[in-house]
Image: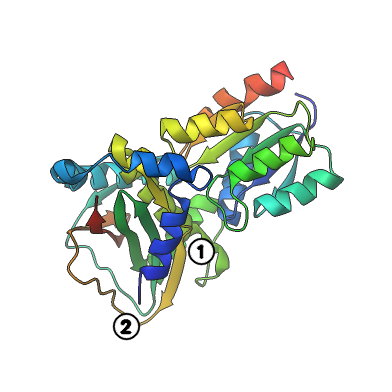
């Protein structure tokens, strides 16, 4: 699985309508703020906020929660601009159906298009909430539209990221993973 | 409140349903919803339907929400109709761009039904 296409789309949306302003803003640098940007509490706060407001449920970090069953659902939203990388959400198919059920009020028996759409939107909101915690990122980092992958036995590989946050959360009796991958910081 | 005709523009069908549910929870019982999955689709809807309220995402494929809003103004498709942007983008720059393009309100995702009520109902009451 490659993130290149998603990153390219995010760069294109960093400021889609005013490229001249985007160029002038590139003098802003995050190099001195790596510690702030990679603060793990920002990711936890973003996950809690999205799940509380959009699903009405609480979730906590929990490394012991079981993650996988036969099918996995992964959503990817790319970052472009001052920070390049991606926000990756991954859960079992069962957990994805539960999340979609909370979002829509519907019941699901399979990972259909509505479930995939819901997980993509969760990932989109997580990415937006996370970058919104750092003002320089909020204004100078674009998001791609979500891509959702389903299947069995696949892994995501990223070569030498600048930094990576990988947290596992418990949601009711299910778990999910959220990963922030930063492979470039200006 | 009397019948309200709303256009919801978002590439996520789940998010369109959540926005619709939030509007009903805000007290808009007689709500007629038109949906569009992109700015292009939104323009097509407005060419055939009259609406009282537009809610639009920003990050969408084929035509984003800001360009959609500019086209609505340029083509005079919904004169006087309040537009509220609902989006993950929350920087002052994005809000400024939305307001300059003609938006009357801005709601950041994730949101609560109460936030939708606070931002949308005053616009409808003023219209």
Where is residue A171 drawn, in percent x and y?
32, 54
Q: Mark 1 = which residue?
A: A115
Relative to A10, B100 lies left or right: right
Q: Residues within 10 Å of mark 2 (few under 14, many from 20)?
A: few
Considering depth in this image, is B62 or B127 the residue closer to the camera? B62
Residue at left offset 61%, top offset 48%: B16
Determine the image quadrant of residue A77. bottom left
Relative to A51, B79 lies left or right: right
Considering depth in this image, is B80 or A62 the residue closer to the camera? B80
Determine the image quadrant of residue B58. top right
| Element type at mark 2 | loop
Residue at left offset 31%, top offset 42%: A137
In 3D space, how far apart are the residues under numbered discs 1 and 2 (Cα atoms)?
Answer: 20 Å
- Image quarter in which the N terminus of chain B is found: top right
For the question of whether residue A183 can be seen, the reply is yes
Q: Is residue A111 above or below residue B23?
A: below
For the question of whether residue B25 can be seen, the reply is no
Q: Mark 2 = which residue?
A: A153
């Amino acid at each position: 699985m490659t993130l290149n296409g998603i990153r390219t789309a995010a760069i294109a949306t960093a400021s889609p309508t005013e490229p001249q302003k985007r160029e002038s803003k590139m003098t802003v640098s995050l190099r001195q703020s790596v510690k702030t940007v990679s603060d793990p509490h920002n990711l936890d706060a973003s996950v809690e906020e999205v799940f509380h407001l959009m699903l009405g449920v609480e979730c906590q970090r929990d490394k012991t929660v079981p993650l996988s069953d036969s099918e996995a659902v992964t959503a990817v939203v790319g970052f472009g601009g001052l920070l390049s990388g991606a926000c990756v959400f991954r859960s079992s198919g069962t957990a994805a159906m539960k999340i979609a059920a909370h979002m829509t009020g519907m019941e699901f028996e399979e990972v259909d298009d509505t479930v995939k759409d819901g997980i993509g939107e969760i990932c989109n909101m997580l990415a937006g909430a996370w970058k919104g915690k750092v003002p320089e990122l909020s204004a100078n980092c674009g998001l791609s539209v979500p891509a959702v992958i389903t299947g069995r036995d696949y892994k995501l590989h990223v070569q030498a990221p600048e930094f990576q946050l990988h947290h596992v959360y418990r949601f009711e009796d299910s778990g999910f993973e959220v990963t922030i991958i930063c492979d470039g910081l200006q | 409140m009397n019948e309200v005709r709303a256009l919801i523009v978002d590439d996520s069908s789940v998010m369109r349903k959540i926005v619709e549910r939030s509007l009903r929870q805000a007290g808009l019982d007689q709500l007629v919803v038109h949906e569009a999955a992109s700015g292009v689709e939104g323009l097509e809807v407005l060419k055939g339907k009259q609406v009282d309220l537009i809610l639009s995402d920003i990050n969408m494929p084929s035509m984003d929400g800001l360009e959609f809003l500019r086209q609505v103004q340029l083509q005079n498709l919904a004169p006087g109709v309040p537009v509220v942007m609902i989006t993950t983008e929350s920087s002052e720059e994005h809000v400024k761009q939305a307001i300059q393009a003609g938006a009357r309100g801005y709601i950041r995702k994730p949101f609560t039904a109460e936030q939708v009520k606070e931002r949308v109902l005053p616009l409808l009451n003023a219209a």
